[in-house]
């Protein structure tokens, strides 16, 4: 159940209508690793950080079975920094600032020990870097999942299209799916994206759940209605971690199992939003996860007699 996770490891500053964070630890690969490590270990991490990234954060992840051989530490440079402000609905946000810093000229190196991985999770990162990782793998993984965002659609569309041709599953939110496909209908958007490469398209809709499309099939996973939503940052990556972690653990890449994967992704995302940054993910127990899975089951279970 070997898994490679690629993505940013970063500092974030977040503003919501209800509070503001200082510079906290974030990054797509950070959230994915925290989430996926509940289901499968080891996780072979690929990223880059500056000398300012706290060693203790890397140590905590290592204790969770996250391998750091593929994480470059550029001592004299600064880590990637992103800041965002959420709107009142907490579903939409504006990026206030993106400082690429070490990500600007990141050349990933896939260590020999990571070769032969069966699952590859391409978290949010420059598409050229995602492509570079795919090209360095001697054998194609059983499943390649990719996440991306509007930032790359606006700044690196040609590279993004090249990566899309090489992946099995694309994960985006609804506005990104519309931007990528130029379609408003998510059904049409998923079909158009499928023509670009990925045979499975997952569209996340924040507090309104997530959809997975494959051929003419579609499945919906709800999001748990929560009393408190504190900070949605990283929810998408945490979702990705739950999805890929489950698939890597079970080694089953059928559509049926992907349906379970998006439920598990939604369960993990529901924890992420409850506190700022990775705080909530760090304290999770297996019992918490199982309890919430039961809540999800109860949320959508009903009996009906058709007459
Ligand atoms: P999410 O809320 O799941 O979309 O992911 C938020 C995380 O993505 C934050 O922790 C950011 O550090 C990271 N992020 C934001 N913009 C970028 C970018 N352009 N490239 C890589 N990671 C990013």
Image (cartoon, helix red, strand yellow):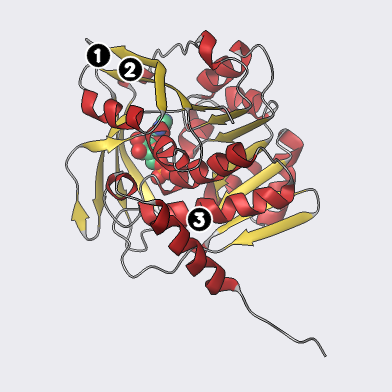
- The nearer-to-camera label among 3 and 1 is 3
Q: Residue furthest bottom?
A: 307
The tag earlier along the polypeptide, 3 or 1, is 1
Q: Are marks 2 and 1 in contact (CB under 8 Å)?
A: yes
The residue labelled by disc 3 is 266
Is residue 304 depicted above or below 51 in this figure?
below
Observer-nearest residue: 43 or 51? 43
- In this view, the residue farthest toward the left is 22
Q: Secondary structure at mark 1?
A: loop
Which residue is tagged 1?
Answer: 77
Q: Of all residues shown, which one is farthest toward the front?
A: 287
Confirm if mark 3 falls within 8 A of ligand 1. no
Q: Earlier in the sequence, mark 2 or mark 1?
A: 1
Q: Secondary structure at mark 2?
A: helix
Does 80 sit left or right of 196 as displayed? left
Foreground residue, 209 or 254? Answer: 254
Does residue 165 appear to the left or right of 156 in the view shown?
Answer: right
N-terminal label among 3 and 2? 2
Query: What separation in Å lies between label 3 and label 2 (alpha carbons)?
Result: 31 Å
Q: Please state, as top left, top right, bottom left or bottom right, where the N terminus lies in the image.
A: top right
Q: Distance from label 2 to label 1 (Cα)?
A: 6 Å
Counting from the top left corner in percent of width and height, residue 267 is at 48, 56
Image x and y of residue 34, in percent: 39, 39
Image-quadrant location for residue 127 = top right
**202 shown above or below 222:** above
Locate residue 136, reporting x and y percent. 59, 11
Q: Which mark is residue 102?
A: 2
Whether residue 54 appears in this view of the structure is no
For discs 3 and 2, the disc positioned in front in the rendered view: 3
Query: Quarter-wise, where is residue 105 in the image?
Result: top left
Label 2 crowd bin: few (<14), some (14–19), many (20+), radius 10 Å: many
Whether residue 252 sits left or right of residue 231 in the image: it is: right
């Amino acid at each position: 159940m070997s898994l490679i996770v690629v993505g940013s490891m970063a500092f974030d500053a977040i503003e919501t209508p209800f509070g503001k964070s200082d510079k906290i630890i974030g990054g797509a690969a950070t959230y994915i690793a925290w989430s996926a490590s509940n289901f499968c270990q080891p996780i072979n991490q690929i990223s880059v950080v500056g000398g300012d990234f706290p060693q203790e954060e890397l140590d905590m992840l290592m204790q969770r079975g996250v391998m750091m051989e593929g994480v470059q530490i550029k001592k004299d440079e600064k880590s990637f920094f992103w800041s965002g402000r959420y709107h009142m609905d907490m579903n939409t946000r504006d990026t206030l600032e993106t400082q690429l810093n070490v990500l600007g000229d990141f050349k990933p190196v896939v260590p020999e020990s990571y070769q032969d991985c069966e699952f590859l999770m391409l978290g949010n990162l420059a598409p050229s870097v995602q492509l570079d990782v795919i090209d360095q793998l001697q054998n194609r993984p059983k499943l390649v999942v990719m996440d991306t965002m509007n930032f790359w659609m606006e700044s690196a569309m040609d590279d993004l299209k090249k990566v899309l041709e090489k992946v099995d599953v694309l994960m985006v939110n609804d506005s990104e799916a519309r931007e990528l496909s130029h379609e408003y209908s998510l059904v049409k958007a998923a079909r158009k994206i499928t023509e670009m490469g990925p045979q499975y398209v997952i569209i996340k809709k924040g507090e309104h759940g997530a959809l997975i499309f494959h051929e003419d099939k579609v499945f919906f996973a709800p999001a748990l209605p929560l009393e408190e939503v504190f900070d949605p940052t990283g929810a998408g990556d945490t979702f990705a971690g739950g999805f890929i972690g489950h698939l890597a653990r079970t080694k089953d890449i059928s559509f049926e199992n992907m349906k379970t994967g998006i439920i598990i992704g939604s369960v993990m995302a529901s924890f992420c939003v409850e506190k700022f940054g990775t705080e909530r993910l760090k304290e999770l127990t297996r019992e918490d996860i199982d309890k919430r899975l039961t809540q999800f089951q109860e949320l959508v279970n009903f009996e009906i007699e058709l007459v």
